[in-house]
Image (cartoon, grey):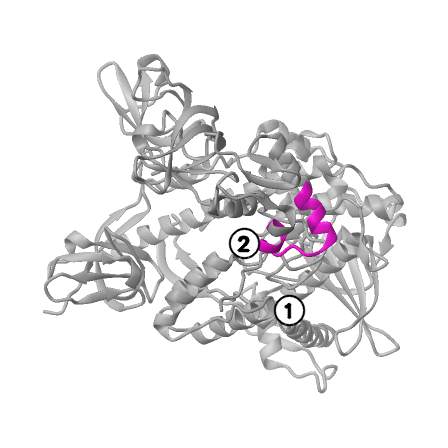
Amino acid sequence: MSKKKKFYKKKGKILKDLTKNIFKILNKDTNKSYNYKQISAKIGVSDTDGKTQLLKKLAELTTLKKIKETDRGKYTINQDRKYSIGTLDVTSNGNAYFISDDFEEDIFIPSINLNKGLHKDTVKVYTYRKRGGKKLEADVVEVLERAKTEFVGVLQINKNFGFVIPDDQKMYTDLFISQNKINGAEDGDKVVTTLIDWPERSKNPFGKITKVLGKPGEHDTEIHSILLEYGLPYEFPKEVENEAEHLSIEITPQEIAKRRDMRGDLTFTIDPKDAKDFDDALSFTKLENGNYEIGIHIADVSHYLQPKTILDDEAYERATSVYLVDRVVPMLPEMLSNGVCSLRPNEEKLTFSAVFEINEKAQIINQWFGRTVTYSDQRFAYEEAQEIIANCSNTNPNKSGYKIPKEVSITDKEYEVSPEIVEATLKLDELAKKLRKKRLQQGAITFDRVEVKFHLDEKSNPTGVFFKESKDANKLIEEFMLLANKKVAEYIGREKGKPSKKTFIYRVHDEPNIDKLASLQNIISKFGYKINTETKQTISQSLNKLLKEVHGKGEANMVETLAIRTMSKAEYTTQNIGHYGLAFDYYSHFTSPIRRYPDVMTHRLLQHYLDGGTSPKADKYEEKCKHSSQMEELAAKAERDSIKYMQVKYMQDHQEKEFEGVISGVTEWGIYVEIKENKCEGMVRIRDIKSDYYIFDEGQYAIVGQSTKNMIQLGDEVVVKVKKTDLERKHLDFYLIEDS
């Protein structure tokens, strides 16, 4: 007997996807009515709070005429309702899907029925079933809101007009540009175009060119194109830079008097070798009772970034720094991000701190939160801290320091680290490992993914590829940042063991999608792996086991990517549901205000409550959380595109070489292959495989030769050679090297 899938398990949770799951039940049998008890049983709601949320949602959907109350307390789908509002997900072939909470599944819209709707637009659609068809289809009847009006593309000029061919593959139509809207751009330029009109009888929207980026293929042109494609700026307005330059940066005695003075505590930073902004520092003091006082000190950006200023408005709009392969596009002007706020060595800094008394078992004995002034004694790169961890012993730490070798040094010179810092680093590493072990025992999932990095020459051309793995020094910093984020969230979010009603900024992560987990199991079973989906605990345990078993193997990146896709997206919200991936009931972002705006909001709210303030209304903050989550997603897409761009650029110089790879995806038009030695991914088109006529077999994740019955399957190891590189579309085509 199969077990019922439960969507919700914890008491007191905000029920996510509630509308969608109600429709999922009511759509199964549209002639049947269900009362709220039957609905709550089917979606796994058993607590009073959950049932209250369900009843409110049923009343809301009835008022909106999305469902009918057929009898007292009994509900069915409103089949008279043919119109719905939602968003479009346009595919690269020009068709689309309509996404709405009204329906269990996304609804197909053929390209001919898009009615000028574009990707991510909010639209009104008419839904219907084709004669004899079981699945719904939809026609767009009205575009309610454009998601995007600026597009990056290449201008092609004819005699008296031009067209901009968009880079975005989901933009299915070119933009018509009249002669008086070309604004000095030349044929072949890569430009930014604003959609200004789409006349009723015109096949193409009308646009005007607002910016010329340069010629396609030029490095800066392509990098700026990536940023602008996602609406991300690459420079600050002059008035923002001007306001930053005129900030008062003096640390006065009066300001110090308002803060806890921790300048005398041994303090240091550990960051990437090429970092310019240092958000966080650690302090270490051995207490007389044998415990340790450990301070997690964070740049006090909120001291300089005041609400209702041009500077704050700009930081909010950006919401995050963007990390591309060759540059950082900061959230704050350089004067702040790399200067006054950066916790540089041998400088006094204003900080916001979480200070913990911790015993040898890594248990928290006492905690304190508040504004501080600190002084960093030393700056380390991860490589230098790793050198200490790997080569020193704490058995006799005060005898001498440790010499950092020249080859791992930030300064490219050998230098000695004091015995006190060696001792602190080793003890922090020891405590971090204990904290990490506890997290994993509680169900945290560890995605220790390998990062692809590039060696670049002075013109930002890739000369080599290398992989960056998280080592003990990285994990040391990670654990203490996680500790601060968790404890700050608990401090505000929990009162007397119960959830508080105070408005706060949470970083939440919902439980995995059960259907996606089933799909993952289906794929990984072909490699001999399995996951146990019985309970929340067995899911996390088996995912950790899977990630450990697959690490270092040819299929590792593919399996890790698929596993990540089963996870819900982490997001910012004032409605706390906990963080599944970290196994924390309370979690916030407190530790990176130089590069994340939600951390600035967290600092402001924390100080507001420390000062005895009452809880502000959540609506304003929820809107800001939503904006921050959206900007984070756009930044992540731009970062991925910049990596793809650099991979294609790198492969341009390796077109004669054969590479070993792993099949990372299979589609009806070809197979995707990831090269083992550099993780560049490209496509082998079915039409380019000459040994047989191959057809896609969706169930086997394979293509099958019709004569030979040869199967080329997901995860197979193959040899490929570059066929074509397309920098503008950031795309690689491969030839499959077949056995002769």
Disc 2 crowd rating (10 Å Cα; few below 14, some 14-19, many 20+) is: some
Disc 1 crowd rating (10 Å Cα; few below 14, some 14-19, many 20+) is: many
Closer to the N terminus: mark 2 or mark 1? 1
The residue that mark 2 highlights is: 568
Mark 2 or 1: the one toward you: 2
Look at the image and tell me in which quarter the C terminus lies. Answer: bottom left
Choose between 6 and 315: the one closer to the eye: 6
| Residue sitting at the far bottom | 395
Question: Picture coordinates of residue 496 (x, y %)?
Answer: 86, 58
Which residue corresponds to the image point at 71% horizontal and 36% vertical from the top-left? 619
Give the CA separation, mark 2 to mark 1: 26 Å
Disc 2 residue type? Ser
Disc 1 residue type? Leu
Q: Is residue 507 left or right of residue 497?
A: left
| Residue sitting at the far front | 71
| Tally of numbered discs | 2
Q: Is residue 307 above or below residue 397?
A: above
Q: Quadrant of residue 65?
A: top right
Q: Main secondary structure of the magenta part?
A: helix
Label placed on residue 334: none
Tell me the SS state at disc 2.
Answer: loop
Which residue corresponds to the image point at 49% horizontal and 48% vertical from the top-left? 636
Question: Picture coordinates of residue 411 (x, y %)?
Answer: 57, 63
Question: Picture coordinates of residue 646 (x, y %)?
Answer: 37, 51
Q: Is residue 38 visible?
A: yes
The residue that mark 1 highlights is: 476
Which residue corresponds to the image point at 55% horizontal and 47% vertical from the top-left? 21
Q: In the image, which residues are magenta?
A: 39-55
